[in-house]
Amino acid sequence: MTKNITFKSKNRGFTLIELLVVIVIIAIISTLVIVNVNSSRVKSRDARRKADLLLLSAALEQYYTENRVFPHQVVQLPATSGAFYSAMVAGGYIQSIPADPLSPASSTKPPYYYVSDGTTSWPPTTPATTSTQYVIFAKLERINDSDVSALKYLPITNTAVSSYALTVSGTSYTYNYWVSSK
């Protein structure tokens, strides 16, 4: 008597449905990670903008303490020459003038902008002769940032606003964050 032994193969693989479910789960997780990473990058750039303006503000206040006047200029930052650069960098108040984290990679991103008072118009069209106030402008990317939505005092115009439009080098920008002397 001979026995026929048969082996039943249990070669089971993943079904198409199982593979599709795994692919969908991976896609959802990847999307969430990418969104969170991009959000973190935006927050980081905005934090740097705020820190840059505070650093410039501290240097300007030190300059004012020693000279009893702020630098006389209306200037797009980072300045690499001119009165503002000479006063701040060559004067030893700051090592270098910071630039927006996206500049110059994005031509649509407003640069930092420094304005001092001492003229009769706002924004000043000519450099001031005696400046007792200044404003440094930046544009934050996050519109839901508490510093964007809050009314902020703009000392040169004596108004409280949440944004301010300026024309810089022929291009109009709306700034939503600034640091000022008052």
Image (cartoon, rainbow, N blue to C red):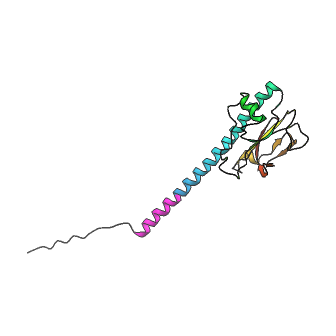
Q: Can you tell which quarter of the image residue 180 is in?
A: top right
Mark count? 0
Q: Residue at x 68, y 34 (%)?
A: 96
Depth check: give the residue in front, 49 or 37. 49
Depth check: give the residue in front, 144 or 112. 112
Magenta region, residue range: 9-28
Q: Is residue 27 in the magenta section?
A: yes
Q: Residue at x 83, y 42 (%)?
A: 154
Give the residue furthest to the top.
66
Q: Residue at x 77, y 51 (%)?
A: 173
- The vertical placement of 172 against 25, above or below, is above
Can you give x and y, in whole percent of width and height, for residue 22 in the image? 45, 62
Q: Residue at x 86, y 37 (%)?
A: 117
Can you give x and y, in whole percent of width and height, for residue 67 in the image? 81, 26
50 to the left or right of 18: right
Can you give x and y, in whole percent of width and height, for residue 55 in the image? 71, 34
Depth check: give the residue in front, 105 or 58. 105
Q: Is residue 98 in the magenta section?
A: no
50 to the left or right of 34: right
Q: Can you tell which quarter of the image residue 100 is in?
A: top right
Location of the C terminus (image quadrant): top right
Give the residue furthest to the front.
81
Location of the N terminus (image quadrant): bottom left
Whether residue 164 is visible here, answered yes or no, is no
